[in-house]
């Protein structure tokens, strides 16, 4: 470990705490859909924008990762991302109108994108030997934050109102930025030379499309699973608990993956296992509708919770230096998030025009089958 970083245990904890802040601003929207419809007059398509727009901005920020690394640096850039998230929460809490919600979604996406573009580069530069495990911890923290937000949003709104519920995530964001700056203020700056121009070969495009389609499953479920169950007669609180349970399952899957992934030099077998779980989960949503919710919750949670970190780990496998890791991850995440942003929007359009979201689940199922074919290309040391 680089001596300029704190002990690996403290750094791992910091990574996890920061990751907790990266999804509540999106995960709370689905359970709050009835309130947002009533108080902010949001349509289903507009609701989808509260997920789609942050994901688009995350993609653009990721594409600018090498530039951000040279201009802001890892420490200041991650701190800036947390500050943007905190400001977004405050503005939403004070003015929870449709225009403010949609506009702030763009700002939040920039903040999330800054952190997601710079954190992997920092990990790869200082802790290359533990990069796979730390990336799994990072993505697990992301899903844990989503689980907490999904499970608590509707009950908090019932008890304290929409404004306070939307503003509350400012607290962990402020705590995270203070801990980050206090702990890592003396870390050596990143190398500011231009990264190697290796991020746009054929394999990089394959990794980008793979990440994008896989993340599309995550953003689709995050945005539309609660409205799907409400459509089948569930209460908002109950639908939020389902999404919370699913994301908690993702957390467990992420921890298990971080403990076991070092045993699989060839990532193709675990990829096929987790993709099969996602496919069966989507099929079960279409088959059971509002019944037997435990089955799709378990399957999708285990599958998505493993696929997201595994996609980033596979990407890191193709980088041979910190600079190359930053460039490759910027391209893969940037293009991938832009692709993933389409799925919630498609679902919103479907929801405004049809009585069922089954068409969205079916489209995603075709994408997962495609990923199974693509995964066969990821042989070790290629």
Image: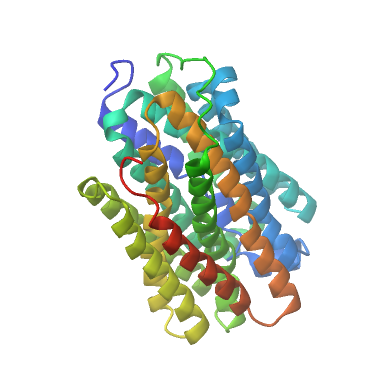
Q: Relative to 220, is 338 above or below?
A: above
On screen, residue 210 versus residue 186, left or right, reads right
Residue 171 visible in image:
no
Q: Determine the residue positioned at 44% across, 42% down.
A: 19
Q: Relative to 162, is 291 above or below?
A: below
Q: Relative to 169, is 269 above or below?
A: below
Q: Which one is in front, 85 or 193? A: 193
Q: Which one is in front, 165 or 241? A: 241
Q: Determine the residue positioned at 55% across, 38% down.
A: 331
Q: Determine the residue positioned at 71% across, 80% down.
A: 354
Residue 159 in picture, x, y percent from top left: 57, 63
On screen, residue 97 versus residue 136, left or right, reads right
Instruction: Using the rendered view, name the quadrant where residue 84 is placed.
Output: top right
Residue 103 visible in image:
yes
Q: Which one is in front, 205 or 225? A: 205
* Quadrant location, the N terminus: top left
């Amino acid at each position: 470990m680089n001596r300029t970083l704190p002990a690996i245990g403290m750094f791992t904890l910091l990574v996890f705490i920061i990751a907790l802040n990266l999804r509540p601003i999106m995960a709370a929207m689905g359970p709050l859909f009835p309130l947002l419809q009533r108080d902010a007059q949001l349509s289903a398509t507009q609701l989808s924008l509260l997920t789609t727009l942050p994901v688009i901005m995350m993609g653009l920020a990721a594409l600018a990762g090498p530039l951000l690394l040279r201009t802001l640096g890892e420490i200041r850039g991650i701190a800036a991302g947390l500050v943007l998230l905190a400001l977004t929460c405050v503005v939403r809490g004070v003015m929870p109108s449709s225009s403010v919600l949609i506009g702030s979604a763009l700002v939040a996406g920039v903040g999330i994108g800054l952190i997601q573009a710079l954190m992997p580069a920092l990990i790869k530069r200082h802790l290359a030997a533990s990069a796979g495990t730390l990336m799994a911890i990072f993505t697990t923290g992301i899903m844990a934050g989503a689980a907490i937000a999904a499970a608590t949003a509707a009950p908090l709104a019932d008890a304290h109102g929409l404004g306070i519920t939307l503003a509350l995530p400012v607290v962990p964001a402020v705590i995270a930025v203070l801990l980050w700056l206090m702990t890592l203020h003396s870390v050596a700056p990143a190398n500011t030379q231009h990264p190697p121009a290796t991020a746009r070969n054929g394999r990089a495009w394959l990794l980008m499309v793979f990440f994008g389609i896989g993340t599309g499953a995550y953003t689709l479920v995050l945005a539309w699973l609660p409205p799907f169950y409400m459509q089948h007669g569930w209460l908002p609180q109950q639908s939020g608990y389902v999404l919370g349970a699913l994301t908690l399952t993702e957390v467990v899957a992420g921890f298990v993956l971080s403990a076991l992934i070092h045993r699989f030099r060839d990532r193709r077998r675990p990829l096929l296992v987790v993709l099969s779980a996602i496919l069966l989960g989507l099929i079960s949503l279409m088959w059971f509708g509002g019944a037997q919710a435990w089955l799709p919750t378990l399957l999708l949670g285990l599958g998505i919770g493993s696929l997201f970190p595994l996609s980033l780990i596979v990407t890191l496998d193709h980088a041979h230096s910190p600079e190359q890791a930053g460039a490759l991850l910027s391209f893969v995440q940037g293009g991938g998030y832009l692709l993933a942003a389409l799925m919630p929007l498609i679902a919103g359009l479907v929801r405004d025009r049809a009585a069922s979201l089954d068409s969205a689940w079916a489209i995603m199922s075709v994408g997962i089958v495609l990923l199974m074919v693509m995964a066969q290309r990821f042989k070790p040391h290629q």
